[in-house]
Amino acid sequence: MAANTPAPRAAAAPDPAAGWRAVLARIPIFAGFAANDLDRLAGCARERRMRRGETLMRAGDPGLSMMVVIQGEVRIMLGGISGREQIIDTLGAGSVFGEIALFDGKPRTADVVAITNGRVLTIERADLQNLIARDPLFALRVIETVCARLRSTTVQLEALLFQDVATRLASSLLALAQGPAPRRLDMTQAALGQLVGASREIVNKRLRAWEDAGIVALSPGRVTLLDEPRLARLIPGRVAKTRLDHD
């Protein structure tokens, strides 16, 4: 008879925390963390799958955690008494949201809605506060993230107060369009209206005029920028720099 041979050992299950550790190490607010702190952070992170249109946070919810976008995009939105919504920011992979809760633990100040399918990591406030106690510089990095978002919101508020719809729309298109020339923005006209504080009808009228002038091209859910220098010249009082200037 053949000699008995030991059965092969089953391969060890992959450690999900190891994967999250590598992801978290590339996110600016976690830069400089010691390896053991990254391990601890990865160990308490929980993955959550998100689906397009899903509300991840609502204004008024308890602020008990922070989330990190691993895959996909989310929008931060404010709702008015009239039911009209205003887009505050759009965040992609590597971005964090809900970070204000780390400091005050008060209710959420805005809604966060998934605009694509994707994944986020949830990290509880208690775990992050322990890390702040061990690494005070982490608190400074979170504060920098909050300040950057506040500056962006201030710029947006200034635009809503002092710029007309055409100027706000042109600025948003130039700021958000992606890809090689001709760059494009994949966003519905309704969402553009929420971003610039105007109705879909007003946005559509302006875009159609620009399309007739050869400045943009329109297709369902997409605006393609055909002539960025001309679009930039529609913004009064600004010497606009576009990507085409450097290509």
Image (spheres, grey):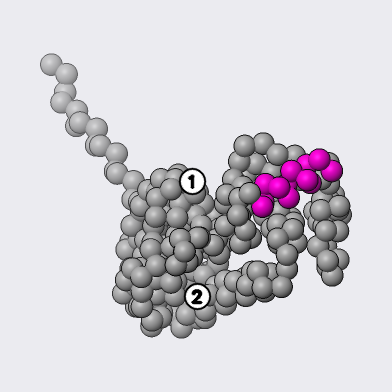
- Total numbered labels placed on residues in the image: 2
Q: Give the farthest residue toward the top.
A: 1
Q: In percent of the image, x 83 and y 66: which residue is there? A: 236
Within 10 angstroms of label 2, few (less than 14), some, or many (20 or more) residues?
Answer: many
- 1 or 26: which is nearer to us? 26
Question: Residue at horizontal 40%, vertical 50%?
Answer: 54
Any magenta on residue 209? yes
Give the labeled residue for mark 2: 142
Disc 1 marks a residue whose amino acid type is: Thr
Q: Secondary structure at mark 1?
A: loop
| Left or right of residue 126: residue 196 | right
Q: Residues within 10 Å of mark 1 (few under 14, many from 20)?
A: some
Label 2 vs label 1: CA separation?
25 Å
- Residue at screen point 67% across, 46% down: 204
Q: Residue pushed farthest left?
A: 1
Residue segment shown in magenta: 202-213
Give the dominant element type of the magenta stretch: helix, strand or loop: helix
Query: Which of the two marks, 2 or 1, is nearer to us in this view?
Result: 1
165 left or right of 57 in image: right
**How far across and down, in percent of the image, does residue 32 sit?**
52, 72
Residue 64 location in percent, x, y?
A: 32, 71
What amino acid type should be assigned to the residue bearing mark 2?
Val
Which residue lies at the image location 74% right of the left edge and 58% below the top edge?
A: 166
Q: Please, what secondary structure does the residue beneath circle 2 have?
A: helix
Residue bearing mark 1: 116
